[in-house]
Image (spheres, coloured by chain):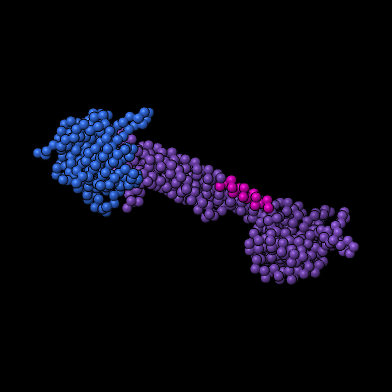
Chain colours: A blue, B purple
Amino acid sequence: MDKIILSAKGINKSFHDPVTIPILKDINFDITKGDFVSIIGKSGCGKSTLLYILSTMDTDYEGKLIIDNEAMLGLKEADLARVRNEKIGFVFQFHYLLNEFSVLRNVMLPGLKLGKYSEQEVEHRALEKLKILGINDEALKKPNQLSGGQKQRVAIARAMINDPLIIMGDEPTGNLDKKNSVIVFDIFKELAHSYQQTLLIVTHDQEFAASTDRIIEMEDGRIISDHAKVRA
Amino acid sequence: MNIKLIADIAKSLLIARWKQTLVAAVGVTFSITMFITLLSFMSGLNEMLDSLILNRSPHIKLFNEIKASKVQPIDLAKEYKGSHHFIRSIKPGAVRLELHNVRSIINTLKNDPAVLGLAPKITTQVFYNVGAIDLTGVINGIDVEAENKLFKFNDYVTVGNYMDLKNIPNSIILGKAAADKMLAKIGDVIQVTSPNGERTPLKVVGLFQSGLVDLDKVNSYASLSTAQKLLGKPNTYITDINIKLKDINRAPALAKSYGVLFNVDAEDIQTTNSQFETGSSVRTTISYAVGITLLIVAGFGIYNILNMMIYEKMDSIAILKATGFSGSDVKRVFVGIALSIGIFGGLAGLLFGFLMSAGIDQIPFNTASLPTIKTYPINYNPKFYMIGGVFSIITTYLAGLFPARKASKIDPVVIIRGK
C-alpha cells in the first residue's frame, strides 16, 4: 500500500448568500503517492470548488482535510501558505506568470520563498525543470514574449520547483488549442509515469480524463463514481 | 533570504510602474523641499527679528528705578506698627540713580558661574545743541570693549571705528537718524548739554544704526569716562549693569535673587520682551502646519498610486499567494514599495530643500534698518532635516499600509476562479 498524501473526510460546503445552497456534500476520498487523478463533472457540479478547498486556499468548509498527515482545518493563514509553498504545486487555466520577471525568475519565485536551497541552487533546479518541459531556451525571456502553450509549460515548471507532494490543476488545458493541449497532457503523463509525480487535475475534457489513471466523477456536489484503471 | 526576495519583488513592481512611482516620489520630494525651505527661511527670519532685540538686550538689567519708597514715615511710628495706611498722593523720593557699591557688585557678578559677562552703563538725558535748537537725546556711557563683546556693538556702527570711542577722549557715536537731523559728519564737534546744565563739546567718531529708527533718533554712545565727565560725576558713577547669562532661561529667577542681593531693581529679558517669543512660536507653528499639510497631501498621492497598482496587480498577488506567499509577505511588498518611494523621495527632498534654502541665502536683502543683513536669512538647523526625513517616512508608511493591508487580504480563489 502506498502512502496516503491527501485525504478528504466528510467535506461539506455551502454558500449562504442569499439563501443556503449546499455546494459540496460529504466528499470522502484519499490520494496516494504517485496517483494520476482527474476530477470530471459538468459545469457547476462543484469540482473546482472542491479543488480550491483541497488546495487550502479556500478555508470556508466543514469536514477534515489532511495533507501529509497534517490537519489543515484551523491552521493560520501563514501556515497554510507554507503548506502550499512546500507541498502543493498549481497549474491554472490561465498561466498567471508575472510579466515583471523573466521566465526563469517566475519559476524560481516559490523556490526562493521556500528558502530550502541557495539562490544558485534554486536557479539550477529551475533550469532543470524547464529542460524537462523543453523550454529551457526561453528561460531569460519575459513571459509576454512566449506563446500560450509555452506559458502554460512555464507555469507547470513553476508548480514543480519545490518538488511538491502533489500538483493540482484547474482546467490546465482549458485555454489551449488542440496541439498545445496534447503537449501539456503528454507532459502530465510523463510526470506521473516517469517521475511518479502525484497529480490531481480538474477537467471537463472527457478525452483528457480518459487517459488518466483514476477518474473521480462528480454531480451536484457529490462523488458519483471513483474508479481506478489498472495501469497497462 | 525572505527579506531579499520581498525587496526584489517590490523593486520589480516599482520598475514596472516607474512613471507612476516617479510621480509619487516627486510629490514627496516637492513637499519635503518646501517643508525644509519654508522652515529654514521662516526660522532664519525669526532668528533675525529676535536678534534685533534679543542680541542687544541684556538678560538681566540692574538699575535703580525712580519710585516711591516702600517704607513711608508712618510705618516707622511705633503706635501704628502692623497697621495699614491709606496715604494718597505719595510722590517718589529723590532716588540716587547710580548703583551703590558698584565695585563689589561687579566683582560678585564676575565670580558668579551663571554669568557670561557684564557691561556697566550710564544712561543720561541730554540736549543736542544744534544752532538755536535743542534736540532731546539720550547718551549711553558704555564700556566699549564689554559692550562689543556681549552686545555686538560693532555690528551696528555703520560709519567710523567703534574703538575710537575709547581711544579718543570726549568722543561720541551718534545714532544715524540723530546725525542726519543735526547734519553732523564724522570729525564734526557737536555741543551737548547735560541735565545739570553744563555744555560740553564732543567729537563725532562714528554713526550707528540699530535697525529701529526711533531709537537712532535719540540715542548716542560715549565711553563711560566721557559720560561721567559730562555729568560731573566720579568714576564710580554707574547707573546700569547689563548682564548676559550662560543660560537665558535662568534670567527670571536670577534677576529676582540679584535684586534682593544687591538691593537694586533687576529686570529680566523674558519680562521685557515677552512679545517676541509669542511671535516666533506662532510663526514656527504656522510653518510646521503648512509643511506637514504638504506631506499629508503627498501621502494621499502615494495611497492612490498604490491602490491603482494593487488593482492592476491582482493576478500577481493571487498567484504569489497561491504559490505560498502569505498575506504578510504581500503586505511587506507593498509597504516596501511605499517606503522606498518615501525614502528616495524624502532624500531628494532634503537635498533640494538644502539647495533651495542655499539659493534663497544668496538673494540680496538690503534694508536700511538692518545694517548687518546682506542676504535673506536662512537657518540651516539639522533639526528640520531630521523632522522632514522622519515625517516623510512616517507618512509614506501610513499611506502604504492601508493599500498593503487590502492587498494582503485579497482572496486568491476569487481572483483565479473569476477568470
Residue A18 placement (x, y as % from top left): 38, 28
> Does residue B135 appear left or right of residue A21 in this picture?
right
Which residue: 16% across, 42% down? A192
Which residue: 68% across, 53% down? B274
Front-most of residues B384 and A178: A178
Q: In this figure, what is the number of numbered marks?
A: 0
Residue A104 placement (x, y as % from top left): 25, 45
> Does residue A14 appear left or right of residue B210 in this picture?
left
The answer to whether one can see residue B332 in this image is: yes
Compared with B168, A8 (above or below) is: above
The answer to whether one can see residue B9 in this image is: no
Which residue is most to the left?
A232
Q: Main secondary structure of the magenta part?
A: helix
Magenta span includes A128: no
Residue A125 placement (x, y as % from top left): 22, 49
Front-most of residues B239 and A74: A74
Compared with B119, B339 (above or below) is: above
> Does residue B220 appear left or right of residue B22 in this picture?
right
Which residue: 42% across, 47% down? B339
Which residue: 58% across, 52% down? B44
Magenta span includes B282: yes
Residue A182 placement (x, y as % from top left): 16, 35
Front-most of residues B260 and A37: A37
Identify the image quadrant of the C terminus of chain B: top left
Q: Which residues are magenta?
A: B274-288
Front-most of residues B327 and B297: B327
